[in-house]
Every structure is written in structure tokens, then in C-alpha cells.
Image (cartoon, coloured by chain):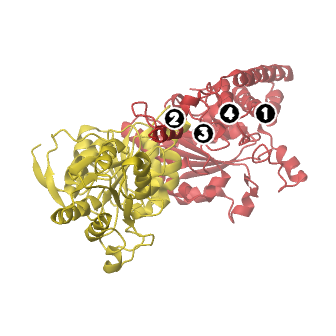
């Protein structure tokens, strides 16, 4: 069982926060592959609180804003950053990037750039777990934006109907790109929808990571025993939708208030107040994390580009012929004379 | 199992049943596949033999059916998802084209999605514009998806068994007009190789390249043409991905004439791709343009008269072939 003590939760959140800051830095340095980078700063408690309750053999899918979840589940920041930079040393050899990162070893069935696209896979993973009786749970992580997608409701209905070991985790950062949740739905109490399908459904305040972890523990345990669940974690997306978005659709006062809901600072304050860790202890910890994440940038920058010939690999299984490149085909046809 | 006289439908059912007996990880999921037995009866009684946990009746949620099959395939099952009509493929296209087809590639080869999506299409039952289409072009246009379209009883069985051995997602499109055709099946016979076309009729004057129900129309047309002195070879592609050009090319080079026959709408369809390939690869050997005898670029009507004339008929194949020799 993982260590779910507050010092550990704090460290895991700090690692997510710092990793995301370094992703931003990678972009500014012009060394990320593109600008489709969606940071989860402000949402750390959802990733860390839920992942703290997962076990080996469990599986999960994430969304376009999923770095923190994968890191909280145990990903190697070097291979993550390398993937975000489009390098061969990344988790997917530079073919997936930020929004299509995956790792079967950690049960990560994939991040997804289609809003809601990764949700139904957990229903299938739940069917597998039921078939194999292996006790695994499968968790779909997605944002509030995905609550506008029909596939979520199809999937929740199936999970409830078949009593699958599945949990739906909605990280409600209040925004689907530039549209605030109250501009996208008449009823922002998202858990009420899940309850209507027969799921165990709760909303928790993401300000407090322990509250998230406790709710996740209860709901995941229920899912393992055939009571699928939905957990909404309320938080605030500190920055724009993607790296180039300066959030012109919201005002400074709102952002200032939103950024006060900082789960990392909240946990830090609690640790100091309770005497568990001193400010000096926490500073030292933060510096250790900063060094680790600095190293991930160096690892990514130093990594090799994928080889051009890898372009035709993995469209199909290795046992299958690779697709014929257009250039090869043209040369062959035009050589006929 | 002995050689048997059976139908396309029962051959499919036998393939599913045997695959499920041989491999506990094979499951079926879809609308009406269990207690109802499948809209066209292909999965009849399988729920009695294998139970509701392996023959799973689903809500009417095509996108999640395919998406759940993706997740099941990634975690060790061999799902056969059923899409009742290929016309509903639009509901599933994200899960099929953005997820199933791309997962191996996006994730750098870490994992494949060994699932089969069984569905059926085509005209012949006055089912109207939303239940009669031939949408294989959508699938063939998506790298990462295999595509099998059996024309015969033998292939209904063997191609389905082979689809369930593939490491990558297979879309398996049956033809609603073929379920009751009869043929001989020897399940123990060595099947034709996956991905290879079959030359069903020899002929040195013209090569007709086709698949699914149009194979039967082409064979009927070829008999008529033979009586008029034109010998047409008929090639059944069997799978559109992989596409076996090695069988087609030499035949076209020998005869110098090629016709492609497909029920799908002509523009940007399977026939267009085949025609382009033949033209590129066999250009120096062609006596005439490669002709596409394809579905009209219109929706399918419910009127039997309009429906029948919306897709190639044996008569149209004969008339077109004769014009090549004027």
C-alpha cells in the first residue's frame, strides 16, 4: 500500500507542480514539441489524492491535461519530459507527446486529445477485470469539459448496469478551454448526473488533498466490490487552456481568487501548523524536487530525435509488413518508364 | 468437424462459437447479440452456450460499445463488438478511428488493440438510406484498421477465425444480402492466406476486381460475357486492408483491361482507390481506362426499384464490359 501520509501527498503534489512549471519552461525555451501543452497547476490534489489509492494492476486513462496524474501514479519524469519534447527516449518514442502519453507497465492506458475519448476504455478494462477476477479497478480521469460529451453518459450507464470496478474522476477546473462551467451547463452539480445513473457519486473540494484521498479511498474500495463510482474534484485552473492562451475570457480578480485555492500551499501550511515538517524541511524538499525536475529537462533536451525510419513502424504489429512509403512507391512506379 | 453444406450466417456463427470455445478471452458485445440472437441471427443461442458474461447485451450506445471493446482488448480480452448496421459507424468513429486505429502508433508500439468489429452493410432489403450503405471506404481510409469483407460461406468462417487471430483491430463487414447463401465449408481445410485475394474465375480478356456481394454479381456477369465471347477473370479481394495488389497486377498486365466493382458510392470510394492503383502500377499494359462500376453518388432509396439501380447489377457489369470491346 502506498504511503498516504500528508508529507508524502505534499511531496507528490510538489513534484507535479514543479514538473508542470518545467514543462512551461521547456516551451519557452523552444524545446517542446509544439505548443499543445496543457498544464494542471492548481489541480494537483486530484491527481495525487486519487492515485495514492491505486494499486499495482489497476489501470487508468487520462485526458489532454494529464501530466500530473501520470506522474502521481509513478511515471519517470525524464521519460515524460522527453516525450513532451518529441524525443526517442520518451515513453512513446516521440510519437505521442504530451497528449498521447501512455505506459502499460503502470497501467496507463493512454492520455487522450479527444475530450472524453479515453472514458469508455475503462468500461472495457472493467470487463477484463471482472472476467479475470483479478481485483483491479480502472479509473477514467477527465475534465469538466468532458461532461458535455455523450460518451461519458454511455460509459457511466454501462459501468453502473454491469457493476464494474470502475471509477470516473472529473477534475472540475471550472473551464472547458475558455468556457466556464456555468456557461456550459444549467446544473454544475456534476455528481448529480452520475448519481442518476446509479453510481456512488461525490464532489470534494480539491483544496484539501487529504479530503480527496479519503474520498478516493472509499470510492475505489467500493468499486472493487462492484459499486462503480464518480468523484468530482473542485479546483481552479491557474493558467490558460494551453501555453499560448492568456485567458482573455476571464478577469484578473477571478484569477486572483482562483489561485488562492492552492492545494500545494494548503498542504504546506497544514504540515507546518501541525508540526509534522518545518519550513526548512519543506524548503529542502522543494529544492530536491526542483533538482529532479531540472534534470528531466536536461534529459529531454539531450535526447535523440526519433529515427526517420521509425515513421512507418507500429502502424501495425511488428509481425506485419510496414506500409509502403509514398516516396518508395513513386520511385517504383515512375521507374517503369 | 466434417465438411458441411451451410449458410453464410451459420458459418459466421460457427466461427464465433469455435473461437469462444478455443479461447476463454473471446467475448461478444453489442446490441441484441444475446437473448435476441443478433439482428440477423448470427449470434443465435451463443448466450446459452457461453453465458451472459461472455455474450454481453449492451444498451444502444454504439460509441461506448466500441470504446469498451478497445479497453477490453488493451487489458487482455479478445472482444468481438457488433455494430448492428455499418450505417451506425458515424456514432463510433472517434473510438474506431482516433482510438483503436492509432493506439499502437501513438503509444510507440507498447500495445495493440486486438479487437474485431463485426458489422454488416449493403443494399437488398429496402432498408432505406440509413440502413443500406456500403461504408467500407471510411474504414479503408483509416491507417491502422484492418478490413475484411467476406463474399463466400468459406470466407465467412475462415476470415472471421483469422480476424480473431490478428494483432490489430479488424473491421469485419458482412453483407446483409448474403446471410442465406449456401456453400460448402470444411472448417479443417487449410484456409486461404489472410490478406490474399482469390482468383475465382480465369479469363484473359478482362479482369474484374471486386469483393463482398458484388463477387456474385461479377461471376454471373462473367458467365453471360463468356457466352458472348468475352472471358473475364474475377478476383475476390476478401480483405481490403491488407490489400493484395500482387494478385491483381499480373492479371491486369496479361489482359490489359480492368474493371473495379464496388457497392460503395463512387467518389473517393474503394473503387476509386483500386482504379488509381491499377492505373499507376499497370499503366503501360492498359488498353482502356480502368473503369469503376460503383454505387451511385446518391443516398439509397427505400423503393426496391430505385435501390436496385443505385448499386452495380450483373447487367451493368455486362454492359460496361461489352463497351470496352467495341
Judging depth in this view, the residue of A193 and B113 nearest the camera is B113
The answer to whether residue A301 is left or right of residue B257 is: right
Which residue carries the number 3 mark?
A: A100
| Same chain, labels 2 and 3 | yes
From the top left corner, tell me how far across and down residue B179 is, in percent. 23, 61
Q: Secondary structure at mark 3?
A: helix
Chain letter for mark 1: A
Label annotation for residue A84: 4
Chain A visual colour: red
Which residue carries the number 1 mark?
A: A30
Chain letter for mark 3: A
Q: Is residue A132 above or below residue B210?
A: above
* Residue sitting at x 40%, y 40%: B114
Quarter where residue B7 is shown:
bottom left
Q: Is residue B40 above or below residue B156?
A: below
Q: Is residue B71 above or below residue B288?
A: above
Chain letter for mark 2: A
Q: CA distance from mark 1 to mark 2?
A: 27 Å
* Residue sitting at x 32%, y 52%: B256
Amino acid at each position: 500500500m502506498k504511503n498516504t501520509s500528508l508529507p508524502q501527498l505534499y511531496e507528490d503534489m510538489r513534484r507535479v507542480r514543479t514538473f508542470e512549471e518545467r514543462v512551461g519552461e521547456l516551451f519557452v525555451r523552444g524545446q517542446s514539441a509544439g505548443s499543445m501543452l496543457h498544464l494542471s497547476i492548481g489541480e494537483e490534489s486530484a491527481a495525487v489524492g486519487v492515485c495514492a489509492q491505486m494499486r499495482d494492476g489497476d489501470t487508468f486513462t487520462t485526458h489532454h491535461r494529464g501530466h500530473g496524474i501520470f506522474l502521481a501514479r509513478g511515471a519517470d519524469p525524464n521519460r515524460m519530459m522527453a516525450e513532451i519534447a518529441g524525443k526517442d527516449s520518451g515513453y512513446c518514442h516521440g510519437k505521442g507527446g504530451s497528449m498521447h502519453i501512455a505506459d502499460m507497465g503502470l497501467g496507463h492506458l493512454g492520455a487522450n486529445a479527444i475530450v472524453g475519448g479515453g472514458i469508455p476504455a475503462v468500461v472495457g478494462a472493467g470487463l477484463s477485470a471482472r472476467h479475470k477476477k483479478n481485483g483491479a479497478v480502472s479509473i477514467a480521469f477527465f475534465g469538466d469539459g468532458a461532461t458535455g460529451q455523450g460518451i461519458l453518459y454511455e460509459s457511466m450507464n454501462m459501468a453502473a448496469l454491469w457493476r464494474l470496478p470502475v471509477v470516473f474522476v472529473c477534475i472540475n477546473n471550472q473551464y472547458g478551454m475558455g468556457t466556464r462551467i456555468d456557461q456550459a451547463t444549467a446544473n454544475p452539480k456534476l455528481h448529480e448526473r452520475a448519481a442518476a445513473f446509479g453510481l456512488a457519486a461525490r464532489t470534494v473540494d480539491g483544496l484539501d488533498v487529504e479530503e480527496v484521498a479519503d474520498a478516493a479511498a472509499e470510492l475505489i474500495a467500493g468499486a472493487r466490490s462492484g459499486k462503480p463510482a464518480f468523484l468530482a474534484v473542485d479546483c481552479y485552473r491557474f493558467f490558460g487552456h494551453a501555453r499560448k492562451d492568456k485567458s482573455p475570457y476571464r478577469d484578473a480578480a477571478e484569477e486572483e481568487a482562483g489561485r488562492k485555492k492552492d492545494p500545494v500551499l494548503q498542504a504546506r501550511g497544514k504540515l507546518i501548523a501541525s508540526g509534522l515538517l518545518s519550513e526548512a524541511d519543506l524548503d529542502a524538499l522543494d529544492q530536491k524536487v526542483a533538482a529532479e525536475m531540472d534534470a528531466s529537462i536536461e534529459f529531454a533536451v539531450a535526447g535523440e530525435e526519433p529515427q526517420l525510419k521509425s515513421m512507418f513502424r507500429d502502424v501495425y504489429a511488428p509481425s506485419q509488413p510496414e506500409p509502403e512509403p509514398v516516396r518508395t512507391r513513386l520511385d517504383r512506379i515512375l521507374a517503369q518508364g | 468437424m466434417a465438411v458441411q453444406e451451410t449458410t453464410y450466417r451459420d458459418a459466421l456463427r460457427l466461427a464465433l462459437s469455435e473461437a469462444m470455445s478455443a479461447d476463454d478471452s473471446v467475448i461478444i458485445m453489442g446490441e441484441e447479440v444475446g437473448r435476441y440472437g443478433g439482428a440477423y441471427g448470427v449470434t443465435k443461442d451463443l448466450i446459452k452456450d457461453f453465458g451472459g458474461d461472455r455474450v454481453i447485451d449492451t444498451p444502444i450506445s454504439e460509441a461506448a460499445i466500441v470504446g469498451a471493446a478497445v479497453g477490453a482488448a488493451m487489458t487482455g480480452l479478445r472482444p468481438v463488438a457488433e455494430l448492428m448496421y455499418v450505417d451506425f459507424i458515424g456514432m463510433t468513429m472517434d473510438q474506431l478511428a482516433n482510438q483503436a486505429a492509432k493506439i499502437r502508433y501513438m503509444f510507440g508500439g507498447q500495445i495493440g488493440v486486438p479487437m474485431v468489429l463485426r458489422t454488416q452493410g449493403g443494399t437488398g432489403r429496402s432498408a432505406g438510406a440509413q440502413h443500406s450503405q456500403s461504408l467500407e471506404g471510411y474504414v479503408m481510409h483509416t491507417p491502422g484498421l484492418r478490413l475484411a469483407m467476406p463474399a463466400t460461406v468459406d470466407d465467412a468462417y475462415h476470415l472471421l477465425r483469422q480476424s480473431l487471430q490478428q494483432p490489430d483491430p479488424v473491421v469485419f463487414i458482412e453483407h446483409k444480402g448474403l446471410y442465406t447463401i449456401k456453400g460448402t465449408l470444411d472448417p479443417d481445410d487449410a484456409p486461404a492466406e489472410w490478406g490474399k485475394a482469390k482468383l475465382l474465375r480465369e479469363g484473359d480478356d478482362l479482369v474484374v476486381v471486386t469483393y463482398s456481394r458484388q463477387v456474385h454479381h461479377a461471376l454471373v456477369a462473367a458467365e453471360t460475357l463468356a457466352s458472348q465471347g468475352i472471358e473475364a477473370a474475377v478476383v475476390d479481394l476478401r480483405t481490403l486492408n491488407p490489400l493484395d495488389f500482387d494478385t491483381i497486377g499480373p492479371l491486369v498486365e496479361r489482359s490489359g483491361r480492368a474493371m473495379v466493382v464496388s457497392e460503395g458510392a463512387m467518389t473517393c470510394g474503394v473503387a476509386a482507390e483500386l482504379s488509381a492503383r491499377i492505373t499507376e502500377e499497370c499503366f503501360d499494359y492498359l488498353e482502356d481506362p480502368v473503369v469503376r462500376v460503383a454505387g451511385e453518388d446518391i443516398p439509397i432509396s427505400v423503393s426496391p426499384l430505385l435501390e436496385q439501380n443505385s448499386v452495380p447489377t450483373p447487367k451493368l457489369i455486362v454492359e460496361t464490359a461489352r463497351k470496352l470491346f467495341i
